Amino acid sequence: MQTIVKVGMADLKVVKEPDVLTTLGLGSCVGIAVYDRFKKIAGLAHIMLPDSNQIKNNSNKAKFADTAIEIMINEMIKLGASQARLTAKIAGGSQMFSFGNGSSDLMKIGYRNTLSTKEILENLKIPILAEDTGGNYGRTIEFYTETGDLLVKTIGYGVKTI
Amino acid sequence: MSLTLEEMNNMYLDVLKEVGNIGSGNAASALAKMIQKRIDMDVPNVRLLSFEDVASVLGGEEMVVAGIYFQVEGDIDGNIMFLLDISSSKVLTSMLMGREDYTGDLDDMDRSALQEIGNILSGSYISSLSALTGLNLKLSVPSLCIDMAGAILSVPAIQFSQTFDNVLLIETILTEGDYEVKGNFFLIPDSGSFEKLLRSLGVYS
């Protein structure tokens, strides 16, 4: 039976076929879906910040791109996934608000989250097959373990599968 | 020395509640003056919420809401977000525009009216805080975004998350006749500014 597993903010989950992973209302956060196409094992992380090394309060590992990806991959391997086969799809990292006086670092957090996510995946040699990042709107995403499709839903910017 | 969440939870929530109360009271009278109608206000609800629970307060992560965001500058730095659900936004803009129908879609005029409402309400809130603390506080121009609650809330949540694992929410319910407007303030001081704020309120030394 297919279960829809919800991933909250600063949270991550790992599932097997036929389950579906979803995270709702991504803004500046980034949703990172990692997939083993052969074993049909998938993980989804909803990260808030780019780097755990820059923050003192870093006990919640799922909050940061670096630690969340590391934990997610380890959990996937435990379920039987092979790191060499992993691929990724990412979404989110938008800038919801902007101020006229040039944007502060904080306003660019979505961009920094996306950048950091890409760097970490590249270092781990996990190819990014598709992405839907940036802009100034929110996204809800669903990852299907059976097909490897990532569905991206928005308010006023349509629905697409990447 | 840094403040733990538990300490804040136990000792400072009451003070912040009082600030929220006075701020919201001033905001309600500013609004009443603007629309020339009587506005009633409930005692605000001040809560510390975990990230997972924030969006559920507003009806779920995918609920469409209006967020009006400000930068606070002066003796402390940080941000304020004023958040309204869509039906409250429609009620407020319709009152302001003198429309009888409170259900129509929001157009560009409504959007700028919403920014103005956010401006007035957040301004009242900030001046109460400023008067109580003796701190010099200024607000930037507002930035408005209408989108999913989860996406909008990710912005203050990310800011808060650099220091805490929770978010501070002040919920105010305003009523005019049969119409209810539920407004939520998020006060997000930058790290360091939070202790300064509490010290100015005389609750932290």
Image: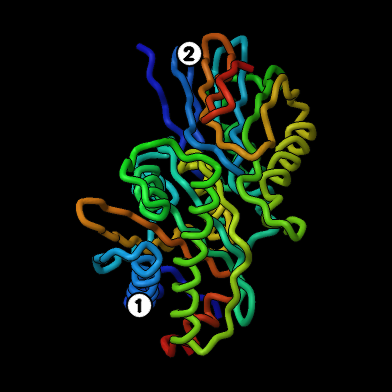
Callout in the foreground (2, 1)? 1
> Quick check: B106 left or right of A35?
left
x, y percent for residue A28: 61, 44
What's the residue at 46%, 71% (across, down)?
A: B4
What's the residue at 38%, 19% (across, down)?
A: A3
The disc numbered 1 marks a residue on which chain?
B
Q: Amino acid at mark 2?
A: Glu
* Both labels 2 and 1 in a single chain: no
Q: Is residue B29 visible?
A: yes
Q: CA distance from mark 2 to mark 1?
A: 54 Å
For residue B34, above or below residue B16: above
| Label 1: how many Cα within 10 Å (few below 14, some 14–19, many 20+) | many
x, y percent for residue B58: 36, 46
Between A122 and B187, the one nearer to me in the picture: B187
The disc numbered 2 marks a residue on which chain?
A
Judged from the image, the secondary structure of the residue bearing numbered disc 1 is helix
Asked whether disc 2 touches disc 1, contact meaning CB atoms under 8 Å apart, the reply is: no
Q: Amino acid at mark 1?
A: Ile
Between A16 and A127, the one nearer to me in the picture: A127
> Quick check: A46 left or right of A66?
left
For residue B173, above or below residue B7: above
What's the residue at 50%, 51% (across, down)?
A: B67
What's the residue at 33%, 73% (across, down)?
A: B25
x, y percent for residue B53: 37, 48
x, y percent for residue B93: 42, 50
Q: Which numbered disc covers residue A17?
A: 2
| Label 2: how many Cα within 10 Å (few below 14, some 14–19, many 20+) | some
The residue labelled by disc 1 is B22
> Quick check: A133 left or right of B44?
right
Q: Quadrant of the N terminus of chain B?
A: bottom right
Q: Residue furthest left?
A: B178
